[in-house]
Amino acid sequence: MLEGAVCAIPVPLHASRRRHRGFNQAADLARHVGIPAVAALRRVRRTPTQTGLPAAQRHRNVRDAFALTRAGAGLAGAAVVLIDDVSTTGATLEACARALKHAGVREVRALTAARAVFSRM
């Protein structure tokens, strides 16, 4: 997963959510995976929390919500590892990966601390 990757990129929180929470759990995780952590993405618009949204709404909610930062400008052609705390539908990871690929990143891998799985019982 990490071999050949130049950096770990945490999924960013919107500035207001970061201020309210006091930390970004994805950034905390990214600092501990063994490769440099780079804040290569930023949220360009505030989005409602994904909690409780069905899959289709989750994807719409985060579409075009992320953009490259100056720190991410030198990543064209690189392989990177995107870090998030939990993946439920993959909508946030997909939106972040789309922004990175649009900026020329060659390969985006994803690493999460947990995967939410729901059974239909």
Image (cartoon, rainbow, N blue to C red):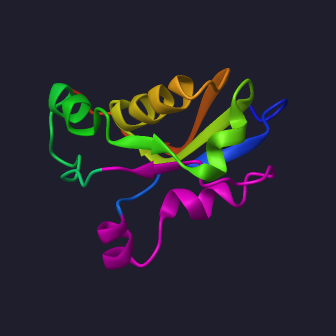
Give how far across and how far down residue 53 sits, in percent: 15, 40
Nearest to the observer: residue 67 or residue 34: 67
Horizontal placement of 107 versus 68: left or right?
right
Question: Which residue sits at x=67%, y=53%?
Answer: 38
Q: Is residue 39 magenta?
A: yes
Residue 121 visible in the current orientation: no
The correct choice, above or below, for 120 with respect to 62 in the image is: above
The correct choice, above or below, for 11 with respect to 82 in the image is: below
Q: Quadrant of residue 46?
A: bottom left
Horizontal placement of 109 versus 14: left or right?
right
Q: Which residues are magenta?
A: 15-44
Give how far across and how far down residue 14 sits, in percent: 35, 60
Q: Quadrant of residue 119?
A: top left
Task: State the quadrant of the N terminus.
Answer: top right
Give how far across and how far down residue 29 sits, in percent: 61, 58
Horizontal placement of 19 versus 58: left or right?
right
Task: State the quadrant of the C terminus.
Answer: top left
Residue 16 visible in the current orientation: yes
Nearest to the observer: residue 103 or residue 113: 103
Question: Which residue sits at x=54%, y=31%?
Answer: 100
Give how far across and how far down residue 61 sits, in percent: 21, 38
Total tally of numbered discs in the picture: 0
Residue reaching furthest right?
4
Question: Which residue sits at x=65%, y=52%?
Answer: 71
Question: Which residue sits at x=15%, y=32%?
Answer: 57
Q: Is residue 95 magenta?
A: no
